[in-house]
Amino acid sequence: MDIQITSTKSEGAERRIQVAVPGATVKDAKKRAARRVAQQVRMPGFRIGKAPAAMVEKKYADVIQQEALEAVMRDAYQAVIEQEKLKLVTQPHAHDVKFADDDALSFELHCEVQPDVTLAHVEGFKVRRPASTVTDEQVKEQIEQLRDQRATWAPVEEKPAEGDMVVVMLAMADDNGELPEGKEYRVVLGAGQAIPAIEELLMELTPGGTVERPVRWPDDFPDEAQRGKSKTVRAELKEVKRKSVPALDDAWAREMGDFDSVEALAAVVRADLEASAVREADAAVRGLLLDEIIGSNAFDVPPSWVTHLVQSYAKAYSVPEEEMERFLTEFRATAERQVRRDLVIETLAERESLTASEADVDAKIQEMAEKRGVNPGQVYAQLQKAGRLREIERGITEDRVFAWLLARNTVEQA
């Protein structure tokens, strides 16, 4: 295609290219469009496709113009991509489209291209592996959490204390000082579910009691408009429940599973915590290595990739529309790091031939099936239905990339 291409911006992954199409090329496109339109429309007194070209061109001038424009710009897009050897990551957009008197067309093409990631420096780094030891206190805390999960709540007829669950009718004065009808709340005292001043109010009551007095909102309250304000609060304590956890004995341990004693349960808890600590340390080492590589190898990141990832975060976290702008700003740096991380892994996987093959995925599924004691075909079908086959492939590839990196860099023990 006979066009003139001039680069007007080439920063990072963004490209802006001025495109000029001669009038003769546009005229030819109009003629072709007119012939196509003439074959499709019906004109009074003529069979389809038999109306004079001049009549068709006059009646359907706008349709022909639009069709010709789309055809020319489509061909121009392709010509620019081929001539400039662009590897696009987003659909290009045309801006400032202009027609000259001689039908010549000009526009500026905005697009983003795949970044050039060479990774010249990936070896010789030194990172420190976090400690992965598990303490007796951690084991104790985990066991206490298991006991807490089996706790029961029983009503008591006395003033509530920290840790108790209360059912309360609360009413807070509006800006005019009027108290509306109260609303029922369930609050665990000391769990940060209510401001301290209201908790203190509730702990003065016994079930059935009511109190009404001013309460000052804390200076660090999340809603800045309410910080430091005093409001009249009416509280009616309807019920107090106290938590009771099971005794830490062998009978409880047997209820938790195939354990003969608390000691046996504690041994399994410790093993699980140790395995988790190792995984966390491994992940930390991977993150530190990636930080070193990203810091030592400059490359551009397409803004659209970052935006798409932030929007995915927002969807996953169900961010309300009114908080979206703040969320997009706060999480953009996190998203950009994730994009850079993925680019490093993908580049090394391709460059060093570390990408998982179909046979690798099949072997992984076979391993998963053997652990579950089921047929591999069943596992494959489940993963395929859940859309997780790509996840399995990425996991294998990442493991290979980090094994390659660990062999070429130093990891010191904390």
Image (cartoon, helix red, strand yellow):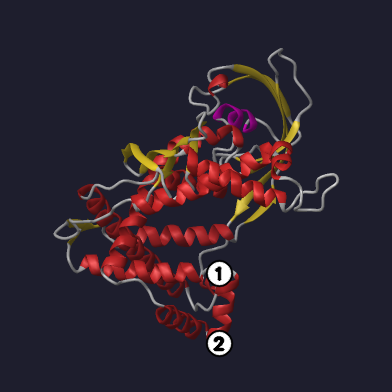
Q: Which residue ends up furthest to the right in the rendered image?
A: 45
Q: Residue at x 80, y 48 (%)?
A: 42
Is residue 87 visible to the viewer in this orientation of the structure? no
Q: Quadrant of residue 257?
A: bottom right
Residue 264's x, y, as percent? 44, 75
- Does label 1 or label 2 sit earlier along the sequence? 1
Residue 116 is a magenta residue: no
Q: Quadrant of residue 363?
A: bottom left
Residue 202 is a magenta residue: yes
Mark 1: which amino acid?
Trp
Which residue, given by chain and number where applicable, does mark 2 sit on? 375
Image position of 402 with respect to 55: above or below? below
Q: Secondary structure at mark 2?
A: loop
**Residue 98 - label:** none
- Tell me where the magenta segment starts and ends, as one range: 196-203
Label 1 close to label 2 by CB (< 8 Å): no
Q: Residue at x 51, y 44 (%)?
A: 73
Q: Residue at x 16, y 57 (%)?
A: 126
Image position of 161 with respect to 394: above or below? above
Mark 2: which amino acid?
Asn
Q: Which residue ends up furthest to the left in the rendered image?
A: 124
Is residue 107 visible to the viewer in this orientation of the structure? yes
Q: Residue at x 55, y 79 (%)?
A: 379
Image position of 122 with respect to 4: above or below? below
Which residue, given by chain and number where applicable, does mark 1 sit on? 252
Q: Secondary structure at mark 1?
A: helix
200 horizontally vs 270: left or right: right
Residue 413's x, y, as percent? 19, 61
